[in-house]
Image (cartoon, helix red, strand yellow):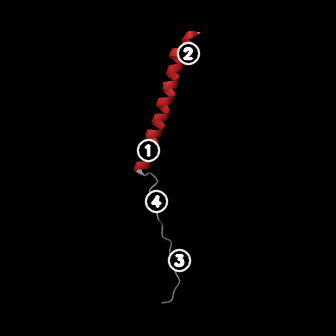
């Protein structure tokens, strides 16, 4: 009964942690809001003057 056995234990980690996903969504949504805010400002106040 002295056998050597190679046993592989497969551990799967959850790749999508809900809290990290939520933080990423809020972060990129903020980037989009700032980008479109700057774009709106340029269109309304800078380009009409030409």
Front position among marks 4 and 1: 1
Rendered position, 5 above or below 30: below
Q: Crowding near pointer 1: few (<14 within 10 Å), some, many (20+)?
A: few
Of callouts 2 and 3, which one flags the residue occurring earlier in the amino acid sequence? 3
Residue position marked by numbered label 1 in the rendering: 23
Q: Separation of disc 3 and disc 4 at Cα?
A: 22 Å
Q: What residue sits 50% from the left and 34% below the top?
A: 31
Tell me, yes or no, whether the two marked residues, 2 and 3, touch with CB atoms within 8 Å.
no
| Horizontal arrangement in the rendering, residue 49 relative to residue 28 (left or right) | right
Q: Give SS at disc 1.
A: helix
- Quick check: 16 above or below 7? above
Tag 1 or tag 4, which sits nearer the N-term? 4
Is 48 located above or below residue 10 in the figure? Answer: above
- Residue at 47% x, 65% y is 11
| Residue bearing mark 4 | 13
Quadrant placement of the C terminus:
top right
The residue that disc 2 covers is: 46
Return the disc, 3 or 4, that comes first in the chain's sequence: 3
**C-alpha span from label 1 to label 3:** 41 Å
Q: How far apart are labels 4 and 2 at the CA level?
A: 50 Å
Label 4 – label 1 distance at C-alpha: 19 Å
Front in this rendered view, residue 28 or 34: 34
Label 2 crowd bin: few (<14), some (14–19), many (20+), radius 10 Å: few
First in sequence, mark 2 or 1: give its number: 1
Q: Secondary structure at mark 2?
A: helix
Residue visible at 48% across and 25% down?
Answer: 37
Residue underneath mark 3: 6
> Of all residues shown, which one is farthest toward the top?
50
């Amino acid at each position: 009964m002295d056998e050597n056995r190679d046993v592989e234990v497969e551990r799967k980690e959850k790749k999508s942690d809900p809290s990290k996903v939520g933080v990423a969504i809020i972060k990129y949504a903020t980037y989009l809001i700032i980008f479109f805010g700057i774009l709106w400002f340029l269109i309304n106040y800078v380009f009409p003057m030409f």
